Amino acid sequence: MAVRTFFKNLLKKLSFNPFSKRNNFKLGLYGPPNGGKSTLANRICQDWLGEEMSTVSHIAHETREIKIKEQVTIKNSKGKELTFSLVDTPGISTKIDYEDFIKKGMKKNDAKKRAKEATKGVIDSIKWLDDMDSVIVTLDATKDPYSQVNITIIGNLQARNIPVLIAANKIDLKKANLDIIKAAFPQYGIVGISAKYGKNIEEFYEQLFKLAK
């Protein structure tokens, strides 16, 4: 009886959980600078961990190093859980010029340092794609999605066959155009959100469960 009880308890512990194999699931936040990646990272962490993850700024390339928040667990409307490591990456850009930072009010030496760090950050972001299980591409819904940067990001994701969800951010702004983003990337699931104000964030979380299947 003792042996039978032991194995019965063991089976309970090993019972099938569709997300159990995803305890080390890496979910990457990718996109161009100032699309709202770090704001979305903070929204996710505030909602589920009660703390922020990244620093945000109106100046591009505020995030210049890979940032990871381990063991983020979210729940859907059916009570299922999904646990992942959230990876906030530096914004990907095809051109980084220190003079652009000077125009934003930075001193020359600081601008050059920021440009150098941002360039390294872009390289690191691309390298880290090989470690991603799924990726959220965060785009500014007020901007033209047919940009060289976006094509570069999507091309790298397609080449690696990584599951993608596009978060069309800033839909709280009047210039936001969700339809044009859907037309640009019909091959991917797209959800319109405001990471800053939490608009439509519940639908975003529901889409994460579909992305992780």
Image: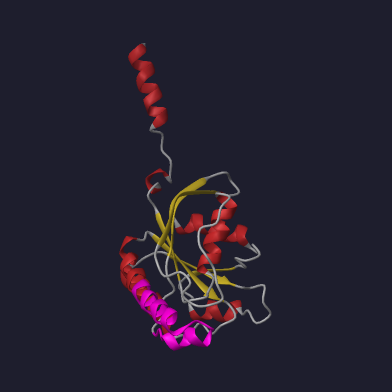
Quadrant where the C terminus lies? bottom left
Residue 61 part of the magenta-drawn span: no
Q: Position of residue 101 (x, y in %)?
A: 48, 83
What's the residue at 34%, 71% (across, down)?
Answer: 126
As drawn, is 8 to the left or to the right of 80? left
Q: Is residue 77 above or below residue 182?
A: above
Q: Is residue 86 above or below residue 4?
A: below
Depth order, front residue of 109/142: 109
Residue 11 visible somewhere in the drawing: yes
What's the residue at 58%, 71% (across, down)?
Answer: 169
Depth order, front residue of 205/122: 122
> Magenta residues?
95-121
As drawn, is 153 to the left or to the right of 178? left
As drawn, is 58 to the left or to the right of 162? right
Residue 213 visible somewhere in the drawing: no
Residue 102 part of the magenta-drawn span: yes
Q: Position of residue 200 (x, y in %)?
A: 64, 63
Q: Main secondary structure of the magenta part?
A: helix
Circle count: 0
| Residue lying farthest to the top in this orientation | 1
Q: Is residue 166 above or below residue 110?
A: above
Q: How is the image coloured?
A: secondary structure
What's the residue at 31%, 72% (across, down)?
Answer: 159
Q: Is residue 27 above or below residue 126?
A: above
Quadrant where the N terminus lies? top left
Q: Position of residue 100 (x, y in %)?
A: 47, 87
